[in-house]
Image (spheres, rainbow, N blue to C red):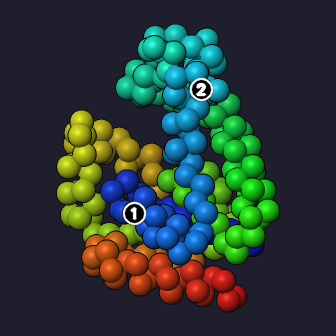
Amino acid sequence: MKIIGLTGSIGMGKSTTAQMFAELGCPVFDADAAVHEMYAEGGRAVPLIRAVFPDAIKDDAVDRTRLGDHMRADPLNLKVLESFIHPWVGEMRQAFLTQSAKAGAKAVVFDVPLLFETGGDKSVDATVVVSAAPEVQRERVMARPGMTEALFEMILSKQMPDAEKRKRADYIVRSDAGLEAARTQVAEILDQILHT
């Protein structure tokens, strides 16, 4: 079973590209969704976050805005949070791999926003970076509810630059040429990965 690491900076079209892989029969593990599950009401991370950042809990779920305030206030807070979140995401990813292998999947996709930044590229068979022109990226991101220029810049500062991701990628999907063009690229990339 081939493991594909899918990444791309904010607003590049990574989620849409992940869906295209899913439509071609590849189970997708979404790291962000795994974290959201842990932050939801009664989620695994709630008790620990309550212990460290009590004001970041509302209605027995993590208030992501308040938690984000803590992360921006002190970089050490992010290290504390990651020290328990990352291992849990790893456990969920391993369970996903086991289940996918039992189901006979030929390839799976790890949808990981910080794939290169966290060293996750070392545990996959191929890396796929989703990329778009900077003006397309900015337009997509600024259309999101609650997004501000400052927040966008802060998120970008935490991510490896797109040009560097493209240099490190095994494959690149250009998401700014339309959905059909991206869909064709994904099908061709998957075919190449499965036959190498």
Residue under circle 2?
A: 43
188 versus 99 height, above or below = below
Which numbered marker is on residue 16? 1
- Real-space Cα distance between discs 1 and 2? 26 Å
Which numbered marker is on residue 135? none
Taking the image as shown, residue 92 lies to the left or right of residue 131, namely right
Q: Callout 1, which amino acid?
A: Thr
Residue found 52% across the figure and 10% down from its top: 54
Taking the image as shown, residue 123 lies to the left or right of residue 23, namely right
Q: Image quarter for residue 87?
A: top right
Outermost front residue:
103
Q: Nearer the viewer, residue 106 or 135?
A: 106
Mark 1 or mark 2: whose residue is earlier in sequence: 1
Q: Callout 2, which amino acid?
A: Gly
Residue found 36% across the figure and 62% down from its top: 12
Instruction: Give x and y (percent) for residue 118.
Output: 61, 51
Instruction: Give x and y (percent) for residue 42.
Output: 58, 21
